[in-house]
Amino acid sequence: MAPKLPLHHPVEQSSTASAGGQAAAHPAPPRGLMRWLLTTNHKEIGSLYLIFSLTMFFIGGVFALVVRAELFQPGLQLVQPEFFNQMTTMHGLIMVFGAVMPAFVGLANWMVPLMIGAPDMALPRMNNFSFWLLPVAFTLLLSTLLMPGGGPNFGWTFYAPLSTTFAPPSTTFFILSLHIAGISSILGAINIIATILNLRAPGMRMMDMPLFVWTWLITAFLLIAVMPVLAGAVTMMLMDIHFGTSFFSAAGGGDPVLFQHIFWFFGHPEVYIMILPAFGIVSAIIPTFSRKRLFGYASMVYATASIAFLSLLSSGLTTCSPWACRWPASCSSCTPPC
Amino acid sequence: MVIGVVVFGVMFYSLFRFRHSKGAKAAHFHEHTLVEVIWTAIPLLILVAMAVPATATLKNMYDPSDADLDIMITGQQWRWRYEYLGEEVAFTSNLGTPRETIRGEGERGENYLLEVDEPLVLPVGRKVRFLITAEDVIHSWWVPDLAVKQDTIPGFVNENWVRINEPGIYRGQCAELCGMDHGFMPIVVQAMEGEEFDAWLAERKEASAQDASGVDREWSMDELMARGEQSYNAVCASCHQADGSGNPPAFPALAGNQALMDERERHIETVVNGVSGSAMPAFRNTLSPVEVAAVITYERNAWGNDTGDLVQPAEIAERLAE
Ligand SMILES: [Cu+2]
């Protein structure tokens, strides 16, 4: 371990409750920018996540304002259709991957160690790494707007072949940035699982954990299940664009609908990835302010787990069944209702 | 709305009535397996009860057999092509709203962006089967009042059907983001009485036979330019712009494109067979030989490209026959 980074003693510290420990026990953190670049403190990383998420929320929000301003009146006023499509696409990508998901990882970083009596996250340096991947991913994604031919313009669900054969050249950078954001999510999820399974205060059983911790544990498993599938989908796009494969082109024996199946295997659980931690937050706030225990804690845990399980199944159902529900898969501008 | 009022009503009443400052004490009950089971089972039963009749209807909805008329619908960036199978009638249906109106010059009509140059004409009271596919990207043929919404997948043919009860005009739109002009490829269906429809179809057959005979004769420059301008503005201008300036680098300029003007052969080849792996479609099947010849002649002589070249329909027809 590098001498400047705080040492990590889960067992001794978990009994002294206060995460981060006494200041005297650690060397002073580096000052200025290096402090934030190198921090392994779960609260500081949590704050970084939250600030990043808020920044992305504003950027994605401005894109939405461009969209709404153009739609204020019929006809073309402010922007051309090509740029309009880039705005809707970027708005979706940034809100989903840059605002909502990092916001919940930030809250998990802050709250999970406190709620389970752990001194920090189980893997503090990986925690730092998974955060700092995000600014890289989104700088890359936003920079595509300045590239020749513009940024992604095929909707946040990027259906092939609009996102392959017919996409702007910057799509390759879009793919790379999704890969980086995906790695960040997977690392964050691994960290949360390792923390919850290994660093609970002595005597705290799984069924003693606050519901927010439970919902995040389940969300983390969902993330690990589906982010690699998304990575697979964009890699297949990359191959179709640059290496002459035809995964999504009927001309070469592929199938454009295959993309939708793969995408929604990710996309459907993604809906729950974005809502389960929020359920956990609600289940913490309401009991607190109504000064009573949560009703049916055990069944809430089971319900959350079965939502996650069913979402993995239903992703297959909504896109695979020959007649039912083709429409949710074809709604390209937004998340399907369920 | 009503549900919202009831739910929030009860919530706000409870929040206000039992507030802490009035000394309310929370009742401490939790865990009750029976109610958990009941409020899981009831929605489940409702869902199953709904699924049974819904499945029967869906099976019926997806049975396109025994149709009286087959229509091939092809989605293209950014227009629809309709082919009356076995009748030798086919045409392309383009956005009817002029570009200037979209830009805000001129009055917007009642059917702004929901009007086309040539509607799909269908008979009432007959079962019409749709065979639906796409040239380039995925589109979706959606006419809400006909309850038809079907994705068009390049390389695959989907089926759907309709039996229209009332004559009239039915309007719809492309419902799958398909690129730049996704919002500018509406659908208009004109439903007529059976006899009226038969007369219309016969007339169209006549007209397309006449168009075919136009291939053999020699066309003059003026004729080709007039015809070419019309087709160019309807079909090519969305990508290459009405003034031929394109939108580089995605869509190359045709005006002042010296390399292209020097290569007449490649020019014809590009328009007939498209450029695979790019957005440039092949027009072999979607434009008639007369239209292809006219549009190429137009491109080679408009906007200061004064090459003086003529491309005769016969030349294109010969190439297509190979
Ligand atoms: Cu379309």
Image (cartoon, coloured by chain):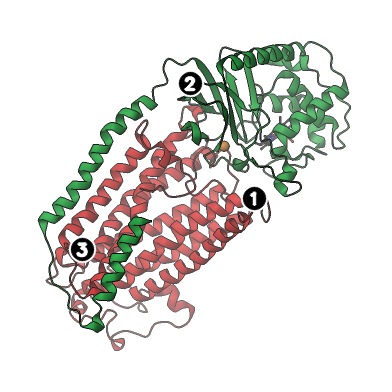
- Chain holding disc 2: B
3 and 1 marks on the same chain:
yes
Chain letter of disc 3? Answer: A
Q: Which chain wears red?
A: A
Kindly tell me whether residue B53 is visible in this rendering. Answer: yes
Name the residue that disc number 2 marks: B129
Kindly identify which numbered label has been placed on residue A299. none
Query: Looking at the picture, how far across and down is residue B3, in whole percent?
Result: 33, 56
- Count of labels in the image: 3
Answer yes or no: is residue B263 visible: no
Which secondary structure lies at badge 1? loop
**Labels 2 & 3 near each other (Cβ < 8 A):** no
Give the foreground label among 2 and 3. 2
**Point 67% across, 49% down: residue:** A75
Circle on res. A74:
1
Q: Position of residue A12 (x, y in %)?
A: 19, 78
Looking at the image, which is closer to me, B149 or B291?
B149
Residues at marks 2 and 3, CA–CA distance in whole angstroms: 58 Å
Q: Nearer the viewer, residue B308 or A285?
A: A285
* Mark toward the start of the polypeptide (3 vs 1): 1
Residue A61, percent from left and from top: 53, 63
- Residue nearest the observer in this picture, A329 or A126: A329
| The hue in which chain B appears in the rendered picture of the protein | green
At 42% from the left edge and 21% from the top edge, which residue is drawn?
Answer: B64
State the SS at label 2: strand
Label 3 sits on a secondary structure element that is: helix
Q: What residue is disc 3 on?
A: A197
> Mark 3 is on which residue type?
Leu
The answer to whether A300 appears left or right of B79 in the picture is: left
Q: Amino acid at mark 1?
A: Pro
